[in-house]
Image (cartoon, grey):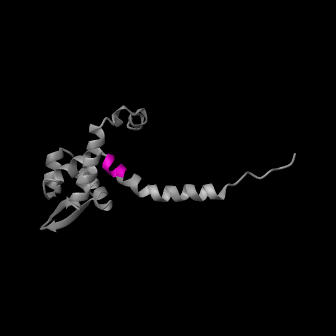
Amino acid sequence: MAMTSPVVDNENDARSADDAALTAPTAALFRALGEPARLTMLRHLFTGEHSVRELTDHLGLAQSTVSAHLACLRDCGLVTVRQRGRSSIYAIADPGRLATLVGAAEDLLDGGSSPEACAHLTEAGR
């Protein structure tokens, strides 16, 4: 029996790799925004700067959990941090553009999008 080599489509493989490289940062941003606690933090930060303690009190979460979520948001470039004494003060990095993004998502939802009905999302959350 003769061995045949598999068909390799280098052009499609390269295109697929390019697509993945282009979409990966956007997917990471949406994953950061997809966590309800992080989105709640961002909404609260739209009211002004807040310390970790203030965010912990507002969310009712452990300080370590809030800090981990804030680290994610900071690493994604969505929030900034500055020191005030011994406290870290967080703020929205680019309020106008983030408000536009969140507003666009809300417009999609108002227009009839219903991601909560997606079985793939509800299955993933289990």
Q: Can residue 85 be found in the magenta stretch?
A: no
Chief secondary structure of the magenta portion: helix
Q: Nearer the viewer, residue 23 or 65?
A: 23
> Which residue occupies 35% across, 37% down?
115
Q: Residue at x 41, y 52 (%)?
A: 27
Residue 46 percent across, percent down from the top left? 17, 53
> In which quadrant of the rendered image does the C terminus lie?
top left
Report whether 25 appears left or right of 60: right
Q: Establish if 7 lies above or below 90.
A: above
Q: Quadrant of residue 110?
A: top left
State the residue at coordinates (29%, 57%).
Answer: 73
Image location (x, y in percent) of residue 25:
41, 58
For residue 42, side relative to residue 116 (left or right) = left
Q: Nearer the viewer, residue 36 or 107?
A: 107
Q: Is residue 62 visible?
A: no
Q: Residue at x 23, y 61 (%)?
A: 94
- Which residue is at the front of the view, 74 or 92? 92
Which stretch appears magenta? 30-34
- On the image, the x and y values in percent for residue 76 come to 32, 59
